[in-house]
Image: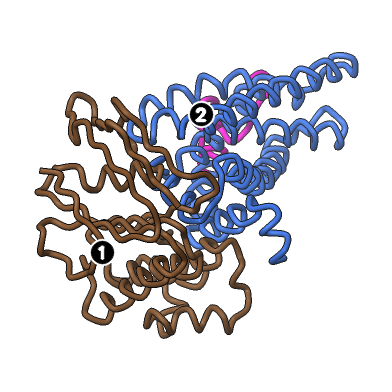
């Protein structure tokens, strides 16, 4: 597992940020990216995950082929008009048809009571827990977490720790962002300052 | 089913879209009642009575088609970024997303078109001047064209500017509606065959064009 970022510059129209960033990461590892508001943390994570909607002005991001990269940021990817159960079925491509498996997964993230509720009626923290449940099931090789403890209580943070541990054990790469150097209490192998 | 979804991921998108449609009921509660109201009010405005004369039958049908398709195409706002993000999380390619989306849209629009044509026939007392099989094929091709254009406009305008969207959609729906109305009013068998071939070609071009734009966009 490898990520190679070379001379990367991102932009939204005329606003350029993250000027000439170079980074080489080899799995298994946990990397922390920190910086002030607008430093480009979320954009960098989105660019790595392949969902950045701005422009890659310069440089490149090379990721070893055949890797599943998933992103967990502060805007949920879940579909509001579907129930928790239906969302899990959609995001796992129906792989969780067995009720028991589905229930076990929801028990893991403490959401079993809400499986028939519409996602639009849930809080941000609950939505984040469901996305984490999907990531636990998908077992991605590379996972990008944007300020992972946002909206989560202590139990929720433990679930994030479980996800990170799982990815790490599978020789994967975890990249997470935080506002300050001491903001998130997650052990990491090295840090990158974007300021 | 589980194996089928894993093999053809577009089924997952299809189920999702139909579930959302079932839950939101936008076509049932918004598109159909408004179109029905226009169907009833149009002759009153144009002729001042609840009767559609032969002269305005074509205009009546085109207005019906454009209203129904326009309301259908603009009934919900999709955001490209959110779609892309959700598809990445679900591991669904843009190609599968397009396929699932177009099938679900056609599944909703096609019966609605047939239903409205039946109501129009009842109200105007003017039956469709072509065979049932021709009518079914033409309506199907028409709904595929409408859905692919609707998806394409969604990509390029991101549903931010409704006016631009409506302008593009109406511009495309008018010639498509004209072709459909001609069939409705009746043409000779030879011309129907030529029309069908033309319509088939146009459908292929529109679907292909939307598909490519969809894949290139992300």
Disc 1 secondary structure class:
loop
Please tell me in which quadrant of the rendered image residue B144 appears: top right
How is the structure coloured here?
A: by chain
C-alpha gap between disc 1 and disc 2: 31 Å
Numbered range of the magenta stretch: B37-56
Q: Is residue A109 above or below residue B137?
A: below
Residue A144 is one of the magenta-drawn residues: no
Shade of chain A as shown in the rendered figure:
brown
**Residue B176 or A80: which is nearer the viewer?**
A80
| Callout 2: chain | B
- Mark 1 vs mark 2: tell me if same chain: no
Mark 1 = which residue?
Answer: A148
Q: Which chain is blue?
A: B
- Residue drawn where x is 50% and y is 24% of the image: B170
Residue B38 is one of the magenta-drawn residues: yes
- Residue drawn where x is 64% and y is 26% of the image: B208
Q: Is residue A45 above or below residue B45?
A: below
Q: Where in the figure is residue A83, as x and y percent of width and height? A: 46, 70
Please tell me in which quadrant of the rendered image residue B63 appears: top right
**Residue B163 or A135: which is nearer the viewer?**
A135
The quadrant the N terminus of chain B occupies is: bottom right
């Amino acid at each position: 597992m490898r990520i190679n970022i070379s001379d990367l510059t991102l932009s939204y129209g005329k606003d350029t940020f993250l000027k000439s960033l170079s980074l080489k990461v080899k799995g298994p590892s946990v990397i922390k990216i920190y910086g002030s508001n607008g430093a480009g943390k979320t954009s960098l994570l989105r660019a790595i995950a392949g969902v950045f909607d701005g422009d890659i002005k310069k440089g490149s991001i090379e990721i070893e082929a055949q890797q599943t990269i998933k992103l967990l940021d502060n805007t949920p990817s879940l579909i509001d008009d579907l129930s928790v159960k239906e969302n899990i079925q959609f995001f796992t491509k129906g792989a969780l048809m067995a009720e028991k498996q589905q229930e076990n997964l929801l028990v893991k993230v403490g959401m079993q009571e809400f499986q028939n509720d519409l996602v639009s009626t849930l809080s941000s923290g609950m939505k984040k827990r469901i996305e984490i449940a999907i990531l636990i099931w998908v077992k991605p090789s590379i996972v990008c977490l944007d300020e992972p403890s946002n909206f989560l209580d202590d139990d929720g943070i433990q679930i994030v720790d479980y996800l990170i541990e799982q990815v790490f054990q599978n020789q994967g790469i975890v990249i997470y962002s935080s506002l300050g150097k001491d903001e998130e209490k997650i052990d990491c192998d090295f840090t990158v300052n974007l300021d | 089913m589980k194996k089928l979804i894993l093999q053809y991921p577009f089924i997952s998108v299809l189920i999702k879209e139909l579930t959302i449609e079932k839950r939101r009921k936008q076509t049932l509660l918004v598109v159909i009642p408004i179109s029905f109201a226009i169907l009833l009010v149009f002759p009153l405005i144009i002729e001042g009575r609840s009767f559609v004369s032969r002269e305005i039958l074509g205009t009546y049908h085109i207005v019906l088609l454009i209203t129904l398709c326009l309301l259908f195409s603009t009934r919900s706002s999709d955001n490209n970024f959110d779609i892309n993000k959700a598809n990445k999380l679900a591991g669904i390619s843009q190609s599968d997303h397009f396929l699932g989306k177009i099938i679900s849209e056609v599944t909703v629009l096609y019966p609605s078109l047939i239903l409205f044509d039946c109501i129009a026939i009842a109200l105007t007392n003017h039956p469709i001047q072509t065979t049932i099989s021709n009518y079914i094929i033409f309506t199907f091709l028409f709904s595929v064209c409408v859905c692919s254009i609707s998806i394409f406009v969604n990509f390029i305008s991101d549903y931010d500017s409704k006016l631009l969207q409506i302008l593009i959609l109406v511009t495309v729906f008018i010639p498509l509606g004209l072709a459909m109305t001609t069939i409705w009013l009746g043409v000779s068998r030879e011309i129907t065959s030529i029309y069908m071939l033309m319509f088939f070609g146009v459908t292929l071009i529109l679907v292909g064009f939307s598909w490519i734009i969809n894949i290139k966009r992300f």
